[in-house]
Image: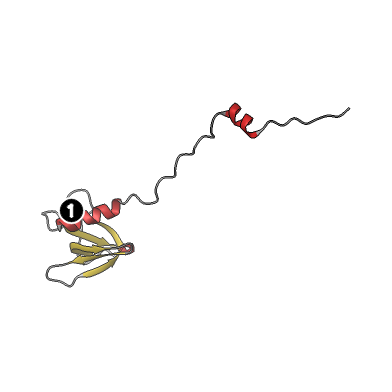
């Protein structure tokens, strides 16, 4: 007695499962470009900014230029600064009050 193995063809299996295998959802992008959009917007409007460094030092000026690792802050009567992004604790738009505190940030003390 000879036994014969019957194998269905690939097209028959695909017909039984469905027309095509389901496609996976694409992975989310690595970058949203939100940071670039924010810097460009502040640069074009020449918005006065307050940059608080990890050391507690406060820098006031206008963002003139940026890249992946640093920003250049233009200060009117003082030298311009190139600040590494890793050294920045946070930054925000300068408000009318000189201390830069609009209720959303801790009080800024210069020269800490």
* Residue 23, above or below 45: above
Where residue 85 appears, x then y in whole percent?
31, 62
Location of the C terminus (image quadrant): bottom left
In this view, which residue lies farthest toward the right? 1
Name the residue tied to disc 1. Answer: 101
Image vertical order of residue 11 relative to residue 105, above or below? above
Asked whether residue 64 is in view, the answer is: yes
Q: Along the line of sight, which residue is nearer the eye, 11 or 102? A: 11
The quarter holding residue 19 reads: top right
Residue 65 percent coordinates (x, y): 23, 64
Q: Which residue is drawn at 59% across and 28% down?
A: 15
Quarter residue 111 falls in: bottom left
Closer to the camera in the image, 5 or 80: 5
Q: In which quarter of the image is the N terminus?
A: top right
The answer to whether residue 55 is left or right of residue 110 is right
From where the camera sits, is residue 92 visible? no
Residue beneath the point at 66% across and 33% down: 9
- Residue drawn where x is 26% and y is 52% of the image: 37
Residue 29 percent across, percent down from the top left: 39, 48
Return the x and y of residue 26 as percentages of the image width and height. 44, 42
Dot 1 crowding, Cα within 10 Å, few <14, some 14–19, many 20+: some
Secondary element at tag 1: loop
What's the coloring here? secondary structure
Residue visible at 22% across and 48% down in the picture: 104
């Amino acid at each position: 007695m000879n036994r014969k193995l019957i194998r269905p063809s690939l097209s028959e299996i695909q017909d039984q499962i469905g027309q095509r295998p389901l496609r996976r959802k694409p992975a989310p992008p690595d970058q949203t470009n939100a940071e670039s959009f924010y810097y460009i917007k502040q640069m074009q409007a020449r918005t006065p900014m307050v940059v608080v460094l990890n050391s507690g030092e406060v820098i006031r000026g206008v963002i003139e230029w940026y890249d992946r690792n640093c920003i250049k802050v233009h200060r009117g009567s003082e030298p311009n600064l190139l600040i590494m992004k890793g050294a920045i604790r946070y930054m925000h738009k300068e408000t009318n009050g000189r201390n830069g505190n609009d209720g959303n940030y801790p009080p800024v003390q210069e020269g800490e």
